[in-house]
Image (spheres, rainbow, N blue to C red):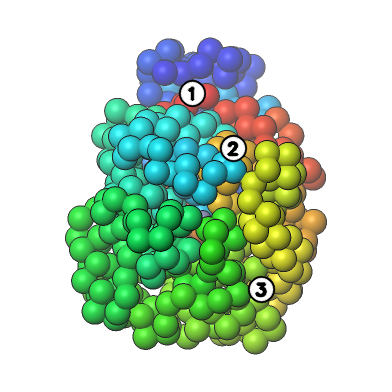
Amino acid sequence: MIDRRHLILAATAGAVARPARAAEPVRFVRAGRLIDVQKARVLEDQVIEIRDGRIVSVGPPPRGRVTGGGVLDWSRLTVAPGLIDLHTHLVGSDQSADPLEPLKHSAADDVLSGVRNARLTLRAGFTTVRDVGTWHGLADAILRDAINDGRVEGPRMKVAGAYVTRPGGGGEVTGLPAGQFPPDDMRMGVVETIADVRRKGGWLLDHGADFLKLIATGAVLTVGTEPGVIELSEDQIRAAVDTAAARRSFVAAHAHGAEGIRQAIRAGVRTVEHASLIDDAGVAMARDHGCWLVMDIYNGDFIDEVGKRDHWPEETLRKNFETTEAQRIGFRKAVQAGVKIGFGTDSGVYPHGWNARQFAYMVRWGMTPMQALQAATISAAESLQWAEAVGSAGVGRWADLIALGEDPMADIRALERPAGVMKGGVLVV
Ligand SMILES: [Zn+2]
């Protein structure tokens, strides 16, 4: 459906005329300004031509009238590629004060929460996400498939299927009385040996996971684990990398501690998540290995504020304090060193749809607005092995676009308020 608000074009716009009618597919988007993330420049007055959901041409308005209808007028707006968040948790309930909260929700209940969260995320301008963990194994794949076949409104998803974690590790629901464990469907990725990693990792990839998410060190939000402590061995991580590579996939490794980060990079992971306590050697290693860092430098403030207000466990607040500032300092060093950075926020810890709040932090901690936008578009797409599909408004990509009332190159917070969102040539808002 085409929203009437966007159809102020017609004769005044000149070359591209004839506004689209409702229910007519968008064939042309007229962009007042278009952010070209590939060449790090902003183009004026561009027309994006769309066929079958994909971009077939981009350039200045053609001479004469374009006939056939389907024109979306964003001539007064700044248009950017749809945003990508590499670290979401769309499926399940939001983080709460109760470490046992995930046990109160069935897989079906979690997927229904995911339906709401997917919609909020897409409408916030995030047309693609990499979803890095669900408590009930493969519930994320159900949501992904429902979005792909049009039953649910949401972003394109690549999903992890489950957390590959050691027993009682950062990817488990912890805090149960001794001798009790969560149900089996919440332990699909629990591994003890290298053989477990190969078997369970391979099984997940063969049954719906798009990549593997490893919990290589302890976690801020999992009670009884410590961010600085290594939880998977380098050989286990390497086994996961090999298992994924054999299926043309990759590994994303959650790692906070400096040693855990270096070990994950050495083992060949594609992205390191959080990287909170990264040291100079880790920064250099990430740069030299071409490993992306996905550093969620916004949510520490959210956890501090809401966690204190709502009485989250003291342990969580302590670990959050120990990682928040350190992570931002590490982020700045990584930017200065030229490490590849992918935009990822840990949504689900904070409310879904607030993802773009992290951009201002990335600019405050050393990126230009263009670099921050590239981290959430072209760079994120490359890390996803989707560079040919998403991440720029280039020919051949899906027509995933957002329109902004203000210029994000002048005020990055403009990305928090998209005036329009298109996914695959279909106007969402
Ligand atoms: Zn996470």
Disc 2 residue type? Pro
Percent position (x, y) of residue 346?
56, 51
Question: Do callouts 1 and 2 mark residues in contact (Cβ within 8 Å)?
Answer: no
Instruction: Identify whether 8 is placed above or below 421.
Output: above
Percent position (x, y) of residue 247?
24, 69
Percent position (x, y) of residue 311?
68, 43
Q: Where is mark 2, residue-wise?
A: 351
Q: Where is mark 1, residue-wise?
A: 71
Q: Residue 243 appears in which quarter of the rendering? A: bottom left
Instruction: Identify whether 110 is placed above or below 254.
Output: above
Disc 3 residue type? Leu
Q: Residues within 10 Å of mark 2 (few under 14, many from 20)?
A: some
**In this view of the protein, can residue 263 be seen by the observer?**
yes
Percent position (x, y) of residue 146?
29, 35
Instruction: Identify whether 14 is placed above or below 33.
Output: above
Residue shown at the point (29%, 73%) measured from the top left: 197
Q: Nearer the viewer, mark 1 or mark 3?
A: 3
Q: Nearer the viewer, residue 235 or 143?
A: 235
Residue shown at the point (80%, 56%) measured from the top left: 364
In terms of secondary structure, where does tag 3 sit? loop
Residue shown at the point (37%, 85%) measured from the top left: 235
- C-alpha span from label 3 to label 2: 25 Å
Quarter occupied by the N terminus? top left
Residue 265 appears left or right of 35: left
Mark toward the start of the polypeptide (1 vs 2):
1
Question: Do callouts 3 and 2 mark residues in contact (Cβ within 8 Å)?
Answer: no
Q: Where is mark 3, residue-wise?
A: 277
Residue shown at the point (37%, 67%) measured from the top left: 167
Mark toward the start of the polypeptide (1 vs 3):
1
Disc 1 residue type? Val
